[in-house]
Amino acid sequence: MTESELKEKAKQLEEKFLPLSGITALYKHPALGADITKLEIGYASADRESKIEIKIRCKEFREYIVIIDVEKKIIINDLIIGHPDFKGAFLACFNSQVEHAIANNYKKITLVAHYQDEPYNYEVAGRDDEGIIWNGHVVWGKYGFQMKETQRIKTFVPSMQAHEKTEDYIHELYLETDNASAAKEVWNDLGLSWGGVFDLGDNSLSHQILRGLNGKYAKLS
């Protein structure tokens, strides 16, 4: 391809797939500048056009990487490192991502809810940023991501039972009760990573949880 053809191809990919990252909720027309320092979109591997990879750095996200599997109709939120000054940014971004995913007939959004007990010095522009605490294991359940069933049965439920807790599902940690708060503390201390799935099907449990979170934030604003 000529340089102009490559630019045109990149533009087409951006128009088609960038909304599936949700970033257009924060930036209507994303472009490199003072607030967005990295915006890359292309094929995840040179020999496969069925997977699109989007890499973003902006004032709200130190790093945001999304992989879109066009054939399987799955979106993978591969890496999300937010910024403490913009804590509400991902909710707006995720609502938009879910909306566009449904409109384009995607089935689910997946991620790994990481935990790491030692801060990770994330390198940005050739220097070490401050240590990043990986605490996704206690974050993503409140957005509607459900633990994969095998892991839920083999890890989550036994872990709760071992500490005399009755919670069976990750989202139950976010109920506004004393029991849920105590169970969340237990899970936080255990520090176990887990694979999460947001089911994009009509009226799924994932949607119900996300609607509850949106309602909670609406009351706070």
Image (cartoon, grey):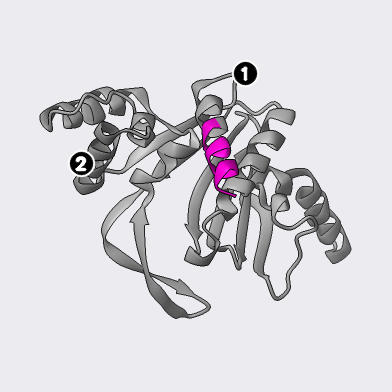
Instruction: Write down the quadrant of residue 119 in the picture.
Output: bottom left
Seen at 50% across and 64% down, the residue is: 83
Crowding around mark 2 (Cα neighbors within 10 Å: few <14, some 14 to 19, many 20+) is some
> Between marks 1 and 2, how big is the CA–CA gap?
32 Å
Q: Amino acid at mark 2?
A: Val
Span highlighted in magenta in the image: 212-221
Magenta segment, principal secondary structure?
A: helix
Which one is closest to the eye, mark 1 or mark 2? Answer: 2
Seen at 60% across and 20% down, the residue is: 201
| Magenta highlight on residue 217 | yes
* Mark 2 element type: helix
* 165 or 129: nearer the viewer: 165
Q: Identify residue for label 2.
A: 186
Residue 168, x across and y down, in percent: 28, 23
Crowding around mark 1 (Cα neighbors within 10 Å: few <14, some 14 to 19, many 20+) is few
Query: Residue reaching furthest bottom?
Result: 127
Q: Identify residue for label 1.
A: 202
**Location of the N terminus (image quadrant):** bottom right
* 72 or 104: nearer the viewer: 104
Identify whether 209 is placed above or below 65: above
